[in-house]
Amino acid sequence: MKLLIPAEPIQARDEKIFSIVETFPEYLGKGQEVALRAYRNREGLTQKRLAEMTGIPQHHISEMENGKRGIGKERAKKLAEALNCDYRRLL
């Protein structure tokens, strides 16, 4: 049997730490869209399957993930139930 040993993190001296905005500036102000897509992917769901689970049309989910449609509190609650997360994370 082969034992796997986790890799040790490497720390450099004077290492600069970058903020999320510095690393991914294209996501600035797109927290809802990113969160919705991330939670959906975490649960292994397609937009179509999420639509079936929530009753929200698939093209609306696509528009929400692309910032073309707001999510709103009631939809956030439906989505959060299907995505096993707090609905406030989607607002």
Image (tube, rainbow, N blue to C red):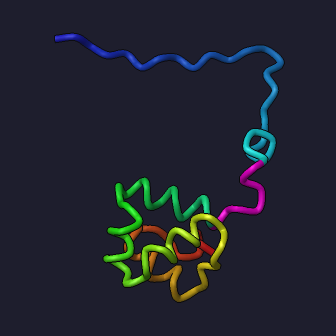
Please state which of residues 7 and 68 is positioned toward the viewer in this rendering: 68
When the figure is inspected, residue 50 is found, relative to residue 25, above or below; the finding is: below
Instruction: Based on the picture, tell me whether residue 38 belongs to the magenta stretch.
Output: no
Looking at the image, the residue that sits furthest to the bottom is 74
Please state which of residues 75 and 59 is positioned toward the viewer in this rendering: 59
Looking at the image, the residue that sits furthest to the top is 2
Q: Residue at x 36, y 68 (%)?
A: 48
When the figure is inspected, residue 8 is found, relative to residue 50, above or below; the finding is: above
When the figure is inspected, residue 44 is found, relative to residue 13, above or below; the finding is: below
Looking at the image, the residue that sits furthest to the front is 59
Can you give x and y, in whole percent of width and height, for residue 24 in the image?
73, 44
Please state which of residues 25 and 73 is positioned toward the viewer in this rendering: 25
Q: Residue at x 43, y 82 (%)?
A: 56
Q: Is residue 13 left or right of residue 8?
A: right
The range drawn in magenta is: 26-32
Q: Is residue 16 left or right of residue 77?
A: right
**Quarter of the image where one finds residue 84:** bottom left
Tally of numbered tags: 0
Q: Residue at x 76, y 62 (%)?
A: 29
Quarter the C terminus occupies? bottom right
Instruction: Based on the picture, tell me whether residue 30 belongs to the magenta stretch.
Output: yes
Can you give x and y, in whole percent of width and height, for residue 15 in the image?
79, 21
Q: Is residue 70 left or right of residue 7?
A: right
Can you give x and y, in whole percent of width and height, for residue 67 in the image?
66, 68
Q: Residue at x 47, y 17 (%)?
A: 7
Quarter the N terminus occupies? top left
**Quarter of the image where one finds residue 19:** top right
